[in-house]
Image: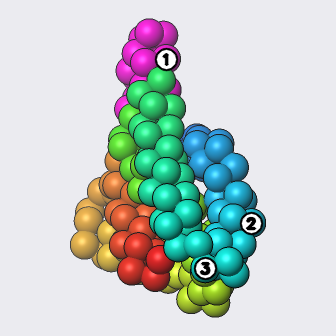
Amino acid sequence: VLGRALGAGDYGHYSTAVALASVITTGATLGLEKLALRELPACFEQGDWDRARGFLVFATVVVVVTSVLVGLLTMAILWCTRSWNYPEHYLMLMILFLPVMTLFMFLLEVCTACERFVSSTIVYRVVVPCTLLIGALLLKHFSNQQSARDAVVLYGCVWVVGGALMLALA
């Protein structure tokens, strides 16, 4: 849907921004989401709620701060190389959504560790893609000229909705 609405050039810019965000999001969690799968069930089994809460607070702060710092570093690299031309400003826009996307991926594993696997997977595999599809259809229907900027904002907003749902589950 987005490919047809945007055209080859804009869809290429959108895809580049999504790919960059995916790579950064994967690295920005620093593996803490996998550690949550091991630590949280152990804390729950031992009834050590303070340790579980401490881990969650620490890991959440680290994940969000890391995504912000990596985003700022990426922006600085683009600025230093004077890459402010047409496609790169979509990268800048996508970087604004990195903390939400990274937190979402962390909370996905936290929900799994807290035995909320089915509901978190439904949000990740059904709600987020369906929201993106509905948003793309609405964008195509109500906008005469769709751009990569519109698609990037839509993509980021979908992750904000998914992040809010994940916070409600966690």
Q: Position of residue 58 (x, y in %)?
A: 49, 51
Question: Residue 162 lies in what quarter of the image?
Answer: bottom left
Q: Which mark is residue 38?
A: 2
> How far apart, in angstroms, are the residues tagged by discs 2 and 1?
36 Å
Which residue range is magenta in the image? 74-89
Q: How is the structure coloured here?
A: rainbow
Q: Quick one: label 2 or label 1, which is nearer the N terminus? A: 2
Q: Which mark is residue 77?
A: 1
Q: Residues within 10 Å of mark 3 (few under 14, many from 20)?
A: few
Pick the front one: 96 or 145: 96
Q: Which residue is mark 3?
A: 47
Q: Position of residue 33 (x, y in %)?
A: 65, 59
> How far apart, in angstroms, are the residues tagged by discs 2 and 3?
15 Å
Q: Position of residue 29 (x, y in %)?
A: 60, 48
Q: Amino acid at mark 2?
A: Arg
Using the image, determine if residue 60 lies above or below residue 83.
below
Q: Amino acid at mark 3?
A: Gly
Q: Quick one: label 3 or label 1, which is nearer the N terminus? A: 3
Using the image, determine if residue 112 lies above or below residue 148.
below
Judged by depth in the image, the label closer to the viewer, 2 or 3, is: 3
Report helix, strand or loop for mark 2. Answer: helix
Q: Quick one: label 2 or label 3, which is nearer the N terminus? A: 2
Q: Amino acid at mark 1?
A: Ile
Judged by depth in the image, the label closer to the viewer, 3 or 1, is: 3
